[in-house]
Amino acid sequence: MAYDQRYHRRRSIRLQGCDYSQEGAYFITICARDKACVFGKLVDGQMLPNDAGQIVAEAWQWLAAQYGHVELDEWVVMPNHLHGIIVISYADCRGGSRTAPTGTTMKRKPLGQLIGAFKTVSTKRINDLRSTPGVGLWQRNYYEHIIRNEESLNRIRQYNANNPLQWELDRENPVGAHRDAPLHEDEPWRI
């Protein structure tokens, strides 16, 4: 079927009117294409990343090294997804990959472009490892939640830290008991 805007329109899951380049903390989930378990496996509640999982971890850490306005908080690579907290902050900003000092203002990447950079870097490196140029690795979109207070931040930190222990119950686990479960109101980012 040819592209037809009436039928093929994707709705944005982003908060209407929100400026995702502003300072703040964001809880992010990025899933592998088709939720394939390509980043490693869990054994006794411990994530054992394979080479691809190690590359994902390195690419995630690269974001903070590459972009001066990015700080990473608690994060975890799982067999088929990544959960992480990104903090965008302009205090003592040290610049970025394509920023040059131009007076007192520097253009910073908003959240969506940061996630795009992470996906590009990790996909290219994993495709190089596998000799599979041009093969997609990630689902098209990502989930984000704006963290609004310290209580929510601490609950999400705990969720990320405990995520490997909860793999059997994880909605992202393609063979888990709760893969089709609806969102629960008591999930840590719902505060």
Image (tube, rainbow, N blue to C red):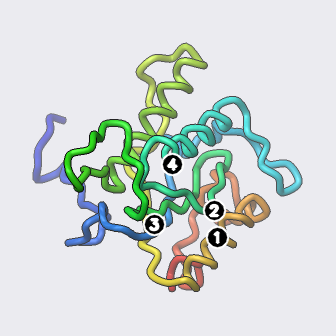
Q: Which residue is mark 4?
A: 64
Q: Which residue is mark 2?
A: 74
Return the mark for residue 157. 1
Amino acid, disc 1: Arg
User: Depth check: 117 or 109 in front?
Assistant: 109
- The label nearer to you, 4 versus 1, is 4
Name the residue rendered at 64%, 32% in the picture.
52
Return the mark for residue 26. 3
Mark positioned earlier in the residue sequence (3 or 4)? 3
Q: Secondary structure at mark 2?
A: strand
Q: Residue furthest right?
A: 44
- The label nearer to you, 3 versus 4, is 4
Instruction: Please determine whether, in this image, residue 15 is positioned above or below residue 12.
Output: below
Please state, as top left, top right, bottom left or bottom right, where the N terminus lies in the image: top left
Residue 31 locus on image (x, y percent) = 52, 49
Name the residue rendered at 79%, 42% in the picture.
48
